[in-house]
Amino acid sequence: MGLISFIKSAGEKIFGKSEEKKEQEKADLILSHIKKFGFNTSDIQVKVDDETVTLTGKVDTLENKNKIIVTAGNVEGIAKVDDRLVVTQPAPPVEPEKQFYTVKKGDYLSKIAKEVYGNANKYNIIFEANRPMLKDPDLIYPGQVLVIPPLK
C-alpha cells in the first residue's frame, strides 16, 4: 500500500482531448480501462482527485494488484496512484514484493532485464509480468511504469 508516482504526460489517452472531464467520469474511464485487460473489477473502487487515482477494494493476488496499479497509473493525465487495495489470497511467504521500473528514453525490455537481472535474455520475464498491458515486447514508451518480478 502507498503512493506510487507516474509521469503525468505519458500513458494511454483514455480521457480524450477534453481535460474538462469531471473526476467521476475519469474514475469510470479508468475502471473501464482496467476491466478491458480482463481484471475482475467488481470489488474495486476508483476515485480521481485532479491527477491522483485512489484504488480501494479487494483483489485476488499480489500479481494482479501490481498490474492493476500500473494499468491505472499508465494513463495520460495521472501522476500518482494511491494504492489502498487489499489482497485476498496471501502471497507465498518466500515471494518478495515486486518492484516497479519507470521506462526511460532509449530503454527496451532486454536492456531493462540486463540492468535489473544482469541478463538481457530475461526480458520475457518482464514482458509476461506486464501482460496484458503489454501486447508486444518492443512496444514500451518513456514514462511507462512496469512491474519487475523477482527471479525465482
Image (cartoon, rainbow, N blue to C red):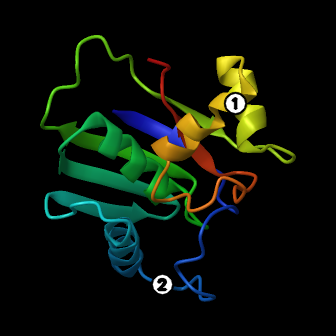
Where is the N terminus found, in terms of image quarters?
top left
Mark 1 vs 2: CB contact within 8 A: no
Give the residue at x 19% y 37%: 87
Whole-percent x, y for residue 83 in the image: 35, 42
CA distance separating discs 1 and 2 = 43 Å
Which residue is at the front of the view, 76 or 100? Answer: 100
| Above or below 43: residue 128 | above
Residue 20 x/y as whole percent = 54, 85
Q: Which residue is mark 1?
A: 121
The amino acid beneath tag 1 is: Asn
Q: Residue furthest right?
A: 106
Report the side of 44 relative to 69 (left or right). left
Say which of 83 and 92 sits in front. Answer: 92
Q: Is residue 64 left or right of residue 15?
A: left
* Residue 64 in which image quadrant: top left
Residue at the far top in the pictured view:
94
